[in-house]
């Protein structure tokens, strides 16, 4: 094990005392959450200093057998090239065997690659950043765009999704110290996979004059693996990679109809009725956003994914930002009341969804009959009135 020395004014040195991690959440997860640069981008990709954007801590991972979020990844990050970076923090003295640790990460990667979508990732990043303007600024810094430049957020996350589908991702284990067995497995995987990087970052901690010094070291690349990956990246850069395009209305409805036969006509009619509420469809690569602009504020009253799930994380995030959480919760409660057995449940801290039979409610359940359709429209109107009413109270301006 390499030692770290401190040098005195007379050029004498003494080794620093190594600090052993005893609390994984406090000494590794919390440390990384406040210092993403402890993942040393210059060591991970020499000559291309990587920068990081946090999409989400405790990123939900779906289980194929149930389709529900049964696991969570410690950190999901993305770099300036849109490469998803999955991070798990472990103590050296964790009771699990290295093969179990690696197997867990590969399971997260395999299912994240299959289930995570651009819209979902964008919503999580929006909530983590604390609003659309803050996310845009973080993406501007991440991508090195000019001051005041607007980054096309949807295009960026479409690129992230495309990288996921192509297995262009990075898997990082953050430890206070790594066992030889784990290093051996990681080096082997790196030699076999050209598009996916598997790395260990040791966040070695040392005691000095009452302070803790953290020194990150990267392991996992053999020189052969590094060369192979550089050649693979160069080949990718020489070919144009088409980003997943936004769907047209017709394309979206046809995809939805494949999953939920009979819903296409009902949803198309419902979209027409939304216009009188100032709510319009905004089609992405795999979803339709119910978009409502209140003054300068852009609301998503829900995302309907092409498989039919109705997602509301973005709504909850904007409500938290504007201190309107009770208004958003009432909207969701109104939707749940339309369908027998449906209820509002928390997903991640500060976010909620409408659930039916322990699964995210789908649009066909919300539009099953005229009563539910009218109820949804009524819930939208009540939500809008509550939001504009709160704005009027804050500003003292007549918003009618």
Image (cartoon, rainbow, N blue to C red):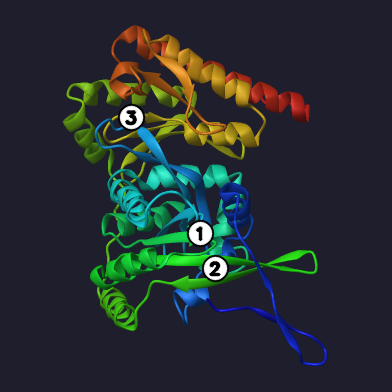
Rendered position, 324 above or below 236: above
- Say what secondary structure mark 3 lies in: loop
Checking the image for residue 151, the label placed there is: 1
Label 2, label 3: how far apart the Cα atoms are = 34 Å
In contact (CB < 8 Å): disc 3 and disc 1? no
In contact (CB < 8 Å): disc 1 and disc 2? yes
Rendered position, 258 above or below 81: above
Label 3, label 1: how far apart the Cα atoms are = 28 Å
What residue is rendered at 55% in x and 79% in y? 2
What residue is rendered at 50% in x and 15% in y? 333
Q: Position of residue 341 (x, y in %)?
A: 37, 9
Q: Quadrant of the C terminus?
A: top right
Few, some or many C-alpha atoms within 10 Å of disc 3 (few <14, some 14-19, many ≥20)?
Answer: many
Residue 196 falls left or right of residue 295: left
Residue 218 falls left or right of residue 358: right
- Specify which label sits upstream in the sequence, 2 or 3: 2
What residue is rendered at 27% in x and 62% in y? 242
* Residue at which label 3 appears: 309
Label 1, label 2: how far apart the Cα atoms are = 8 Å
Q: In the rendered image, which quarter is residue 86 located in?
A: bottom left
* Residue at which label 2 appears: 145
């Amino acid at each position: 094990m390499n030692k770290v020395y401190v040098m005195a004014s007379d050029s004498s040195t003494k080794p620093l005392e190594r600090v052993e991690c005893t609390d994984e959440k406090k000494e590794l997860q919390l440390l990384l959450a406040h210092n993403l640069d402890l993942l040393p981008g210059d060591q991970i990709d020499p000559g291309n200093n990587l920068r990081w954007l946090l999409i989400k801590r405790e990123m939900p991972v779906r289980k194929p057998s149930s389709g529900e979020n049964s696991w969570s990844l410690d950190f999901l990050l993305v770099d300036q090239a849109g490469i998803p970076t999955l991070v798990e923090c472990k103590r050296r003295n964790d009771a699990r065997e290295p093969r179990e640790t690696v197997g867990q990460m590969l399971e997260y990667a395999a299912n994240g690659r299959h289930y995570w979508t651009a819209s979902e990732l964008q919503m999580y990043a929006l909530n983590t950043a604390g609003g659309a303007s803050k996310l845009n600024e973080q993406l501007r810094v991440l991508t090195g765009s000019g001051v005041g430049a607007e980054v096309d957020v949807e295009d960026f996350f479409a690129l992230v999704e495309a990288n996921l589908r192509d297995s262009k991702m990075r898997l990082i284990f953050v430890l206070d110290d790594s066992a030889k067995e784990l290093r051996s497995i990681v080096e082997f995987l790196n030699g076999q996979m050209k598009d996916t990087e598997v790395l260990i970052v040791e966040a070695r901690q040392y005691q000095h004059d009452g302070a803790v010094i953290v020194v990150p070291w990267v392991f996992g690349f053999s020189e052969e693996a590094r060369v192979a990956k550089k050649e693979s990246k160069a080949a990718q850069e020489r070919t144009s990679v088409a980003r997943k395009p936004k769907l047209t209305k017709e394309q979206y409805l046809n995809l939805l109809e494949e999953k939920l036969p009979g819903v296409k006509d009902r949803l198309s009619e419902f979209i027409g009725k939304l216009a009188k509420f100032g709510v319009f469809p905004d089609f992405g690569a795999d979803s339709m956003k119910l978009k409502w602009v209140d003054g300068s504020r852009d609301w998503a009253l829900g995302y309907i994914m092409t498989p039919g799930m109705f997602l509301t994380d973005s709504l909850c995030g904007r409500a938290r930002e504007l201190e309107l959480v009770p208004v958003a919760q009432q909207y969701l409660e109104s939707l749940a009341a339309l369908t027998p057995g449906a209820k509002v449940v928390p997903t991640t801290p500060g976010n909620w969804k409408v659930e039916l039979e322990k699964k995210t409610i789908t649009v066909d359940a919300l539009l099953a009959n005229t009563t539910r359709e009218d109820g949804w429209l009524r819930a939208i109107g009540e939500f809008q009135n509550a939001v504009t009413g709160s704005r009027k109270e804050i500003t003292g301006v007549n918003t009618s």
